[in-house]
């Protein structure tokens, strides 16, 4: 694995789109979490996590995304995941049962159009 993750953020109206690209697993976790928190601080607590360019995720990556998702909601914000997801990423959400518990939108545009979560 390349041990590379790239996190970018942009405002889309009242929402913050946070794109996570590359590989989100133990060796990349600290940098990714730091970058996501910085984007959230700059752009607000109404988040859409764009995972379309995420190639790989492990349980630590899933745990971190869920933790940040729940933190946004705890602060009065909202959060949503958006794809389309790579096969391995979709499978990780599926086997962890998170795909059934958290809504994953087919695209960022869909998440933005449908509002919260």
Image (cartoon, rainbow, N blue to C red):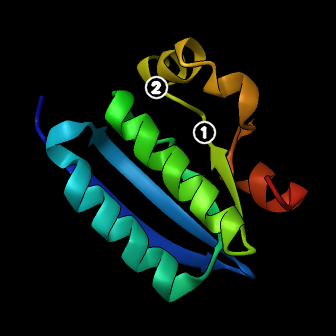
Spatial CA distance of label 1 from label 2 is 10 Å
Where residue 86 appears, as percent x and y from the top left, is 47, 26
Say if 71 sits above or below 56 in the image.
below
73 vs 41, left or right, is: right
The residue lying toward the viewer, choosing from 105 and 32, is 32
Instruction: Give the labeled residue for mark 2.
Output: 89
Residue closest to the far front = 74
Name the image quarter holding the N terminus: top left
Instruction: Give the labeled residue for mark 1.
Output: 83
Say if 10 sits above or below 114 in the image.
below
Question: Dot 1 surroundings within 10 Å: few (below 14), some, or many (20 or more)?
Answer: many
The count of marks equals 2
Where disc 1 sits, the SS reads loop
- Residue under the point 86% across and 59% down: 113
Asked whether residue 56 is in view, the answer is: no
Q: Marks 2 and 1: in contact by CB < 8 Å? A: yes
The residue lying toward the viewer, choosing from 90 and 45, is 45
Say if 58 sits above or below 14 in the image.
above
């Amino acid at each position: 694995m390349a041990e590379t993750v790239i996190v970018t953020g942009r405002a889309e109206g009242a929402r913050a789109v946070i794109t996570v690209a590359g590989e989100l697993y133990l060796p990349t976790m600290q940098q990714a979490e730091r970058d996501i928190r910085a984007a959230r601080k700059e752009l607000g607590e109404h988040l859409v996590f764009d995972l379309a360019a995420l190639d790989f995720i492990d349980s630590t990556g899933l745990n971190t995304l869920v933790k940040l998702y729940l933190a946004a909601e705890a602060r009065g914000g909202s959060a949503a995941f958006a794809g389309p997801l790579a096969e391995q990423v979709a499978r990780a959400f599926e086997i962890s049962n998170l795909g059934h518990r958290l809504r994953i939108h087919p695209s960022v545009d869909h998440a933005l159009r449908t509002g919260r979560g």
